[in-house]
């Protein structure tokens, strides 16, 4: 199985999961770009948000992202990012939501 997040999901690669339920799990990003930088990841292999059709899973991903932000104590603010496909610079081709927080995060996009 080549996909890195599938290998983490199955336990083939050991990881400390901040949250796990029947549909999704959460890990800290290995290269954090903010004091809190977590990844909310579906257990099923879905390439990106473009391919997501399961509304129950979509709801779970969002509610777990908010739950993790609360657990991290990000009451001052946080950001959710889903890089989807080439122009967004998606590096891992398995859907994931980035949760960022713990410092002022600046403007949404850098100038193109
Ligand atoms: P993307 O650019 O696809 O939205 O982001 C992929 C993210 O996954 C990057 O922030 C990268 O640091 C993170 N990442 C890549 N491989 C691993 C890994 O094996 N474990 C964890 N926890 N994060 C990873
Ligand atoms: Zn996968």
Image (tube, helix red, strand yellow):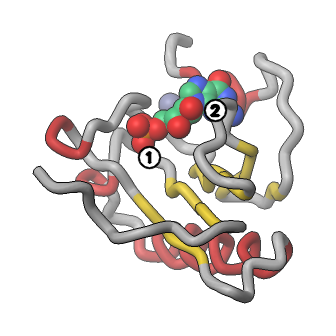
Whichever of labels 2 and 1 marks the residue nearer the N terminus, that label is 2
In this rendered view, identify the residue nearer to me: 111 or 78: 111
- State yes or no: Cβ of the residue under disc 2 lies below 8 Å from any atom of ligand 1: yes
Residue at figure coordinates x 84%, y 45% from the top left: 17
Between tags 2 and 1, which lies in front? 2
- Give neighbour class at mark 1: few <14, some 14-19, many 20+ (Cα, 10 Å): many
Task: Report the side of 54 relative to 40 (left or right).
Answer: left
Residue at figure coordinates x 39%, y 57% from the top left: 82
Task: Give residue 22's position: percent from left, percent from top.
Answer: 74, 58
Check the image and report above or below for 21 versus 12.
Answer: below
- Extreme residue in the top direction: 2
**Residue tagged by mark 1?**
95
Mark 2 lies on a secondary structure that is loop
Task: Give residue 19's position: percent from left, percent from top.
Answer: 83, 58
- For marks 2 and 1, give the CA distance: 17 Å
Task: Report the side of 7 relative to 54 (left or right).
Answer: right
- Extreme residue in the bottom direction: 75
Residue at figure coordinates x 64%, y 53% from the top left: 34
Check the image and report above or below for 62 versus 33.
Answer: below
In this rendered view, identify the residue nearer to me: 53 or 77: 77
Mark 1 lies on a secondary structure that is loop
- Give neighbour class at mark 2: few <14, some 14-19, many 20+ (Cα, 10 Å): few
Residue at figure coordinates x 88%, y 38% from the top left: 16
Let me know if residue 6 appears in the view. Answer: no
Task: Give residue 54's position: percent from left, percent from top.
Answer: 40, 66
Check the image and report above or below for 40 versus 73.
Answer: above
Q: How many marks?
A: 2
- Extreme residue in the left direction: 112
**Residue tagged by mark 2?**
31
């Amino acid at each position: 199985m080549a996909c890195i997040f599938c290998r983490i999901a199955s336990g083939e690669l050991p990881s400390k999961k901040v949250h796990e339920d029947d549909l999704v799990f959460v890990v800290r990003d290995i290269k954090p770009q903010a004091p809190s930088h977590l990844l909310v990841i579906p257990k099923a292999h879905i390439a990106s948000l473009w391919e997501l059709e399961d509304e129950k899973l979509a709801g779970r991903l969002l509610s777990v992202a908010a739950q993790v932000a609360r657990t991290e104590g990000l009451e001052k603010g946080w950001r959710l990012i889903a890089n989807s496909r080439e122009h967004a610079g998606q590096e891992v081709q398995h859907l994931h939501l980035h949760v960022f927080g713990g410092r002022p995060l600046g403007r949404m996009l850098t100038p193109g």
